[in-house]
Amino acid sequence: MFMASVVTDQQAQTQATTTIFIAPSAINLTAEATTTATTTNSTTTATTVATSSKAFRNDETEYVANSKAVASLVKTYFKDIPLMTDIAYCESRDRQYTPDGALFRGKANNQDVGVFQVNEHYHLKRSSALGIDISTLEGNLRYARLLYTEQGSDPWISSSSCWKKSEAYKQSIGGDKLAVNTDNK
């Protein structure tokens, strides 16, 4: 279960904490009760959103250095788009975090983050505006689904030499239905 919350410095208040249940075709959001706590720090009133790349802040510790758990979640979340399971493997070998809990970053480009290697340079501003934290596993999956819905597999073309070999890709383009007519009649 993933938890998302916003914290203010003046009044540490979890505003409409949202529990997100990963479902194969969509994300089901349900609001939980709001809780309030008072802090002694009144020097700043700015709203602070946690930006740490540590998995521990989102109760995602089970996914740290556990690519099998990540792969299982990706497969469930993208049950309706099996190709995305292959893309996740090819992009990150099913890793969202490093063994020490830090965000998994690309080797060729360290702005590529998470299981789907979403590039922060191109997508961080938009994903943040949509309320999606691509540094979390839940957010990375949600944003990958958005990208796939808008652009198909194009955002992951750089790893296509890997995932285009998959059975899911062949089925997505009708490769399993291709037949060669050998009759000359």
Image: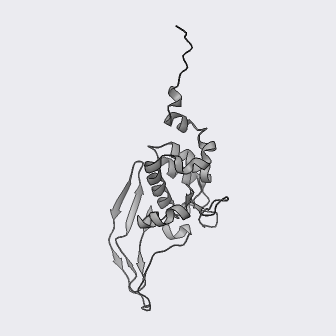
The answer to which of 71 and 166 lies nearer the viewer is: 166
The picture quadrant where one finds residue 121 is: bottom right
The picture quadrant where one finds residue 166 is: top right
Is 29 on the left-hand or right-hand side of 59? Answer: left
The answer to which of 136 and 164 lies nearer the viewer is: 164
The picture quadrant where one finds residue 130 is: bottom left
Q: Assign the N terminus to one quadrant of the image.
A: bottom left
Name the residue located 63 percent from the left edge and 43 percent from the top edge.
162
Give coordinates of residue 110: x percent, y percent: 63, 63
The answer to which of 146 and 14 lies nearer the viewer is: 146
Give coordinates of residue 172: x percent, y percent: 49, 36
The answer to which of 119 and 91 lies nearer the viewer is: 119
Name the residue located 59 percent from the left edge and 53 percent from the top edge.
94
Q: Is residue 76 above or below residue 40?
A: above
Is 92 on the left-hand or right-hand side of 39? Answer: right
Q: Is residue 114 above or below residue 5?
A: above
